[in-house]
Image: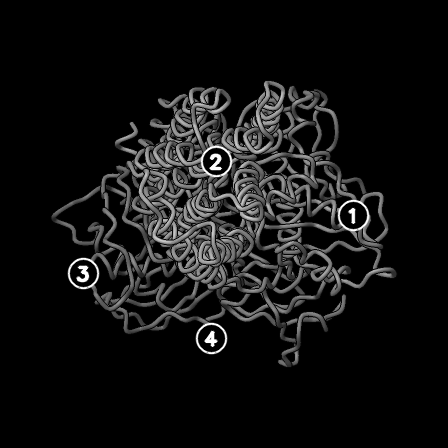
Amino acid sequence: MPNCTLCDLPTGSDPHADPDVEGEYCCQGCLTVARSLEDVDDLADLEARTPDADPSDSFDGETAFLHVDGMHCATCESFLELTAAEREGVAAAEASYATDTIRVEYDPDRVAADELPDALSVAGYTASDRANPEPQGDDVDVVRFLIGGGFFGMMAMLWYVLFLYPTYFGYDPLLDLGGVGGLYLFTQIWLFTSIVLFYTGYPILRGAYVSLRAGRPNMDLLVSLAAVSSYTYSTLAMLLGRTDLYFDVTIAVILVVTAGNGYESRIKSRATGMLSELTTAAESEARRESGETVPTEAVEPGDRLLVRPGERVPFDGTVAEGTAAVDEALVTGESLPATKRPGDGVRGGTVVTDSPLVVEVGEDATSTLDTLVRLLWDIQSSRSGIQRLVDRLATVFVPLVVAVAAIAGAGTLAFGGAPAEAALVGLTVLIVSCPCALGLATPLAIAAGIRDAARRGIVIVSDAVFEAGAEIDAVVLDKTGTLTDGEMRLLETVLADGPDPSDPDTDADRLLRRAAALERASAHPIAEAIVDAAAADRGSSDRSAPASPTIVADGGTEPAAAGSRTDGVDPDRDVDPASASGSASDPVDVDAADVTVTDRGVEGTIDGDRVVVGHRSLFADRGWALPDRLREAGERATADGNVPVFVGWDGQVRGVLLVGDGVREGWEAVVTDLVERGKRVVVLTGDSAAAARRFEEHPAIDEVFAGVPPEAKAETVRRLGAGERVAMVGDGSNDAPALAAADLGVSVASGTDLAADAADAVLLEDRLAAIPELFDVTSGTNRRIRENLGWAFAYNAIAIPLAVSGALNPLLAALAMGTSSLLVVSNSARSVADVE
């Protein structure tokens, strides 16, 4: 059986194709994407920005996904990939610091999977199983800074203040610096400085080593050069009996840069801690048909599993017994659950909503949800983090500074200067090159950006968002749960003849209450939406229902408030009354008797009338005429992807309740705002074209891709990204691969933990207006970073020539460096509003 040209899923016996589009596709959604984006397939940029082919395609081995703590730049990625490649039995590795993930292709006959974490836990990096990462605390960093830097650094500086600094200004020393007392003093300072440099500064030195090993100079290398050079010069000077020691420069450089990095990490950790606990989708156990609970690892193809209402289907398979509505929103993005009967296929990770099913496990005993997880990890490990601007500049600036220092030192010697004088000139150049200001430029601005985002209810998961967010050209929005609230609710009530005050039977409230009185007996998702609406309409406080939807008797359309359901279903399906969870205590204020639940609706007796609620075919079977007004309303609802529920009694259809997935408040203003910012807006959904039609008609939305399966969403984002920078906003597990594939992934926190894990930023509140605010924060932070770097380099343009000429000594260079750093700190402390 051929696979889909876009997403590589099986196409089935009747693939979708078009003479104008090359290839065969598994669904209409994939065909639509291919037709719209085929013109970018051959762009070289697509190849440059799309991950290489999976090494497993040509390697007959196993794949391991590891979490690596300690990565913070693109150089870390290169180093870990080199380290993994040197391990016997490892064929290839791809790392991503943006997601702290490394994918390792290995031969299990030559290296065991449990040996890989230890093999990659080198140079301060800590690797662990990606599915169960070891918790990482910041206690070591706190101890390293407070004890190593705070205590020993301050002790060394105290001796400088008491004994050395006064001599720099012409005062007599308090002790003989050339005697035994001076040697004892210098030895203490040297020891304290050594602790600060090699203990507190270890992460910086490691970063420098990694950059040299990977052949990519970075900011850590420049900072390390200044710190180690001043330390080495001062150590040699002390051994030679000199008193012009610059250990204080080493301490200042290490402490200032460490403090900046630590501040960024603390702010990020605090913001990440604001994430609410999200839905856990993975299943670790399954229930056999006999009722026995077993681990999912013990399940074999062909096993028959019992899945009760409210439980997830553990594996892909086929319904063997039972009929139920299955909510597929988590896996496919469909807003309305699908009716599953014997012989129908079901996907692992979907939820059975109302009646138990017996599912026969498929031949591979796999879960669609697990497939999505693997696809997500593949994409994450292939997506390199954005190399910080300062590190890109450092690849040129570091060699330049070293060359200038060497030339300045050599020039001093050539013009008759002493070796010590030449070394001092070279050291001054390294110190004055402002490693502190450059080292603080990015972390402090990012920390401020994380803080500003948190104040707006946005958690920044990856600091790469600040460069990516400033360059976004197109924003791709998921529909279900993002543009819509993902909750079934009553949208509208339409009466057969319009409101008539003289006839209480035409009252919309009466119609709703009668329908709800019967729907209480059903666990049907739409039934519960109707009951919730009726309870809310009567001001009930006993149900976690939404505010009452506006009941429009004349057929008008007014949006309802958000409901409490998270799913929906076509009412034409079987419902088992014995398994219904509806409560007769719901305050609908109407009593029903002799209630019967069928596969197409509910009927019962209310106040002597036989009331019928459900699919239009129920009324056709009874010969009840359907008024044109209600037929048109029902057709309109179906065309819009909603569900019409008809209500009637005494031989007449009295009205129709239109139930569906309501749109989020303010979505139109948000998409219009994005367009005004010069961004193209695209809607991408696994839901039907009918359900997405309302967005397709909006002038601010450039394109709508509907019916796109989860595996194809990521490929769609990649193809869109061939010619522009793309942001993806979604909430479900089915969106996770697309979130990871985008240049900027934004997850809504009401979604799943898999989506949040794939995202670069998470919106803590169900407030779409936070999306434009995120772009405000990212652009403001990016501007602040560039201002900081601009000042640092402008300063260097003045200070380095002075150092080369000998007009500065290391102490004055350190003071100038401190002033520059103070300006960077002050600029970074401003809020986004101040920057704008």
Tell me the kind of residue under disc 4: Ala
Badge 2: residue crowd in 10 Å (few <14, some 14–19, many ≥20): many
Q: Is residue 711 left or right of residue 453?
A: right
Kindly identify the residue that appears in the image at 53 percent across and 32 percent down: 424
Q: N-terminal of the two: label 2 or label 4? A: 2
Q: Is residue 524 left or right of residue 554?
A: right
Q: Nearer the viewer, mark 2 or mark 4?
A: 2
Q: N-terminal of the two: label 1 or label 4? A: 1
Tell me the kind of residue under disc 1: Ala
Q: Nearer the viewer, mark 1 or mark 4?
A: 1
Do labels 1 and 4 touch, CB within 8 Å?
A: no
**Which residue lies under the disc numbered 1?**
85
Under circle 4, the secondary element is helix
Label disc, if present, on residue 435 of the rendered structure: 2
Kindly identify the residue that appears in the image at 63 percent across and 75 percent down: 287
How many circles with numbers are drawn on the protein? 4
Badge 4: residue crowd in 10 Å (few <14, some 14–19, many ≥20): few
**Which residue lies under the disc numbered 4?**
578
Tell me the kind of residue under disc 2: Pro
Q: CA distance from mark 3 to mark 4?
A: 29 Å
Q: CA distance from mark 1 to mark 4?
A: 60 Å
Q: Is residue 405 depicted above or below 242 in this figure?
A: above
Q: N-terminal of the two: label 1 or label 2? A: 1
**Which residue lies under the disc numbered 3?**
539
